[in-house]
Amino acid sequence: MPLDWSSIQEKWRRKWEEQKIFETEPDPSKKKYFVTVAYPYPNSPQHIGHGRTYTLADVHARYMRMQGYNVLFPMGFHYTGTPILAMSKRIAADDQELMDTFISIYKVPKEQVANFNEPINIARYFHNEIRQGMQEMGYSIDWRREFTTIDDVYTKFISWQFRKLREKGLVAQGSHPVGWCPNDGNPVSQHDTMGDVEPEFTEYTLVKFELDGYKIPTATLRPETVFGVTNLWINPDAEYLKVQVDGENWIISSKCADKLRFLNRAIAIQDKMKGRELVGKKFTVPLANRSVTMFPASFVEPADGTGIVMSVPAHAPYDYQALEDLKQSKSLLSSFGLGNDQLESVKPIVIIESEGYKDIPAFVVINKHGIKTQDDPKLEEATADLYSHEFYKGKMLSNTTLYAGMSVARARDEVKKSMVKQKLADTMLDLIKPVRCRCGAECVVKLLSDQWFINYSDANWKSLAHKCINSMHLMPDEIRSEFDYTVDWLKERACARKSGLGTRLPWDEEWIIESLSDSVIYMAYYIIAKYVTDGSLDGYRLNDSFFDYVLLGNGSTNEVAKSCNLSIDLVNRIRNEFEYFYPVDSRHSGRDLVPNHLTFFIFNHIAIFPESKWPKQIVVNGSVLMEGKKMSKSLGNIVPLRSAIRDHSADAIRVSMLVAAELLQDADFTLDAVKGIRDRLERIYNMCIQFKNKESTQLEQEDKWILSRLQHTVENTTVAMERLRVREALHNAIYAMDQHMQWYFKRADAKERNDDSISGVVRQVLGARVRMLAPFAPFISEEMWETLGNDKSVTLAGWPKVDESKFDYAADESEILIANLLADAQNIIKVTKIKPKKVFIYAAASWKWNIYSKILGMVMQGNTNFGEIMKTLVGDASTSKVKESPDMVKRMIDDILSDPLDSRERKVKLSLDEVKVLDDAKNLLAKELDAEIVIYNEDDQSKVDPKNKAKVARPYKPALFME
Ligand SMILES: [Zn+2]
């Protein structure tokens, strides 16, 4: 009968709730551990992709709880921002596409969607949906601390946060660039863009080429390469404008003119033209005093930069390849009235030297990447390679006038400064990569005036942020450089909008604090939220003195109690609870939040809290693929979490999300894997039912072995969990242990031991295994734990500890010996196709053990030289007989070297009675090889050895003969 997962899930959800297992109170006798995960934005149901981060955080919380910590794991809901507002407007306007998404992908009942013209209804609906999903997934959340970011007390808290930032001079009003949606007339950040990308922008240099009184600006990040320009590129079919920009005549794409307007440049249009009108014209190169020709290029995007590009084929792989491609299509050139000679005369001009790049650097790197055409996606990587190589290692050559001998890094600044000063260049802020708003409009950079900003440019603040990152535990550690990079890169950032849900800026109420600014210190609010839920606190009574005291310890209990009309006892309790639980011990989030949320989280904690309350750890994970593909609405492969739980069980989904990849890797979610995992869990559960509680009396060899394996597994799994290497932990606890169990049952079976005789041992193994599975598959683990005869939750049972007394190295090596021998024999049978009646096994003679142990000793001392080892052995009377068998010594050295280090260390302390070991497995060998097994010691004078095979036996390598 198939297992009824849904009733098991329901049973344990109810028990957890009744027993309040995850409701955490301060307990000074226990060490606390505070785990949080980025709260969800309720504008859609959670799907498999969201599940990974939350599941990982829950596994972490459950693991720490089993390690004896008093773990607080709470959850809130982030209502702030404009996306829900935009959705409700679309619903009100009868947007069919969005309705379809709600009804057919998100499975929202039709009558519900009708209410979605009110933004709050969308938020409430999905809030409820997500909470139920989290409960069904078994997340061990203290739900008494649930809140939304539009709750009264929360908005008081955020107002307090902003007054603090302002007091410290970190919020200011002014003109600053922001990512902007021209369609919505609002700043955009990651939450507002398609594909959830953070709009990153930078300052480009516009190098101005000249023709008949018109400047032709080209945008570049490498102004120093102006000395290597050989030609210009323009899109012949795109629209360009003759314009006056701040009084100077320019030719630029019409899209560029739009962008300049958002940057508050004064633009006056004079005339329109097609790009082709400039093809073949000659332009003067600034600083270099040469003239170059304009070539046609369909790859030039009018929206990038100015829509005209300078070509530096020696140092820009794209330019090099485009010129090569153009040489292959000469008819194109002639259609523009250009001769071959004009193209042939374009020769790359090398202006930078750097180690490892002889000749033309772009050519070298193109070859290295095997690039053949300009459409090759590898060009991007090649460009990035060369760009950073020359930036760090490059030096300007003698053909760069004043800059000769200068490092590229320095020349870049100097050339830019000098050209801007001489009006040979200008600058322009632009997005590094194109970004689209969720409404579909192409985003731009806008210089916004009167905007409220958080000043992440503040140098002192930045250096404290680096300090905090330095002292933090980051998992995995390789993410550290991304944080440092973000801290350096961040500039002033718009923190308020004119529309959306959220908290009003306390001193300028037409502004609403935006979603990446009201979500940075809310972890502290979880302490307060519990008292809002139980009715002790309300927004009406609270003022800043409350937050100053509870969160910072400023002021006095009496004053706060009086001014907020609260009891002294309550104020004390809240303050003590905050002191107990804060700081955050571990913050979980997806990798995509490193460049914004996670870094803001660090910045704002530093600004508001003393160092003792700064966060201790951040854990970052990669995304989830569905059957190898990115999840997207257009692919229709988004699986809502709740329906997946119904189909496959929460436990199997939890394990499959985590077993597929380590932290930063993308995890591939496949239905086959989910089914496989569910089957495995059911098999373990069935074992719990099968084996009754029995004392184990006398331990057999395989009993000692499986108990020793169990200690290794507990040890390795614990080490993996401490680093949150969950994939490794699961492989140890599930897959490796399954293999060990299989071998164990095979051994016991061959000896015809019944269930009663192995129950005691099997249950010891299961007891530890269930506890190792509990953080990952909590429902079935509880059920298993109960089946094993325990009456309390497995969460309270604690993580298994290594029992040193059960490590048994002789048993470890014995089973390896048997398994290897069996595999060797099976292999011989397969290769020779002989069907043996009898298999003779010869264990090595005792004098060989003596030699083996001497050699092992020497190898452990670092001596692996055959000649020297031989000399030592021959020089010793007790081992001098090896003179006649140098070949055996050679083999023993090889045997030892092919052993893993830990096995060598074990063997140093061991001397195995091989005959006894082999005798123990005689039945198994007979059964597996389907033959009579005869075992001798090589020393045995009466042994039967028709082919004289015994002499090749070595320690741990018995000799075989079959007939
Ligand atoms: Zn938009």
Image (cartoon, rainbow, N blue to C red):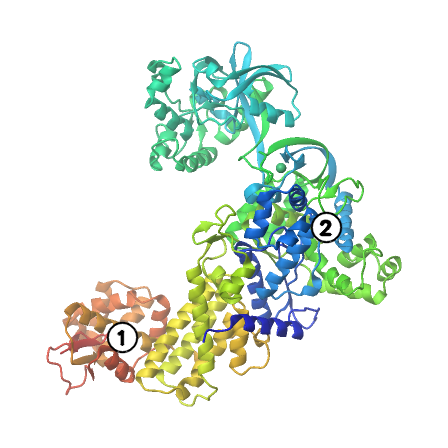
| Residue 508 placement (x, y as % from top left) | 79, 40
Q: Which of marks 2 and 1 is nearer the N terminus?
A: 2
Left or right, residue 450 beside residue 948: right
Tag of residue 375: none
How far apart are the alpha carbons under marks 2 and 1?
65 Å
Considering the image in quadrants, where does the N terminus appear?
Answer: bottom left
Q: Is residue 115 above or below residue 229?
A: below
Amino acid found under the numbered disc labelled 1: Tyr
Q: Is residue 244 above or below residue 40?
A: above
Residue ID for mark 2: 608
Q: Quadrant of residue 830?
A: bottom left
Residue ID for mark 1: 956
Name which residue lies at 11% across and 77% down: 947
Left or right, residue 864 beside residue 516: left
**Any atom of ligand 1 within 8 Å of the CB at mark 1?**
no
Of helix, strand and loop, which one carries label 1?
Answer: loop
Please name whichever residue, 124 or 846, is drawn nearer the observer in this view of the structure: 124
| Residue 720 placement (x, y as % from top left) | 48, 64
